[in-house]
Image: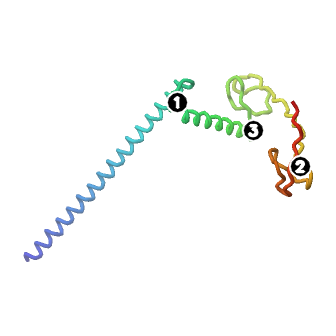
Amino acid sequence: MAFFDELGKKISNAGQAAIQKTQDLANIAKLNGSITDEEKRINNSYLEIGKLYASLHEGDFEADFEPMISAIKDAQGKIANFKKQIQEIKGLVECPNCGAEVSANVAFCSACGTPIPKPEPVVEEAVVANTCANCGAVLEDDARFCTACGTPVEKAPEEN
């Protein structure tokens, strides 16, 4: 009988140890989640500090910040260009008064009533392709040799 009592105690202790390990793992996971939340809070604070610094020092930032601020300005320019392309695809223009997006073919802004200026039609000049005098292949503007036949490209004298 003592054997079974001893076996029961060992099984009970093993079960208690497994429960304790499970609780420990759950607590560790909870603490790791709390650490991640605090790291996100710190990163958001750094982000806000950076935004504030960049807005307060647009023209007088320290040299160490130049590459980062230049990258931000470059990205902002690209974003503005992408947004303009999206507007063109959608057939929209931005109201010069209130900034609302309105259809390109309306005369007045539906948000503020401001007249919407019509863009001047773009007249494209005929582009004459630079061609090889020997074989007639189209050449790059800065080509010194024809890539099709290897003939040296003669440049016309530039006008002043």
Q: Name the residue under label 1.
A: 63
Mark 1 falls on what kind of element?
helix
**Three-letter code for the amino acid on which mark 2 is drawn:** Thr
**Residue shown at 21% from the left, 62% from the top:** 17
Mark 2 falls on what kind of element?
loop
Q: Where is residue 7 in the image (x, y as percent from the top left)?
A: 14, 73
Mark 3 falls on what kind of element?
helix
Q: Is the residue under label 1 in contact with that under label 3 (CB below 8 Å)? A: no
**Residue shown at 36% from the left, 47% from the top:** 33
Cα gap from disc 2 to disc 1, whole angstroms: 47 Å
- Which one is in front in this view, the residue at disc 2 or the one at disc 3? 2
Camera-nearest residue between 113 and 34: 34
The quadrant the C terminus occupies is top right
Q: How many labels does the image show?
A: 3
Cα gap from disc 2 to disc 3, whole angstroms: 34 Å
Q: Is the residue under label 1 in contact with that under label 2 (CB below 8 Å)? A: no
**Three-letter code for the amino acid on which mark 3 is drawn:** Glu
The quadrant the N terminus occupies is bottom left
- The answer to whether 74 appears left or right of 62 in the picture is right
Cα gap from disc 3 to disc 1, whole angstroms: 38 Å
Q: In which quarter of the image is residue 115?
A: top right
| Circle nearer the N terminus (2, 1) | 1
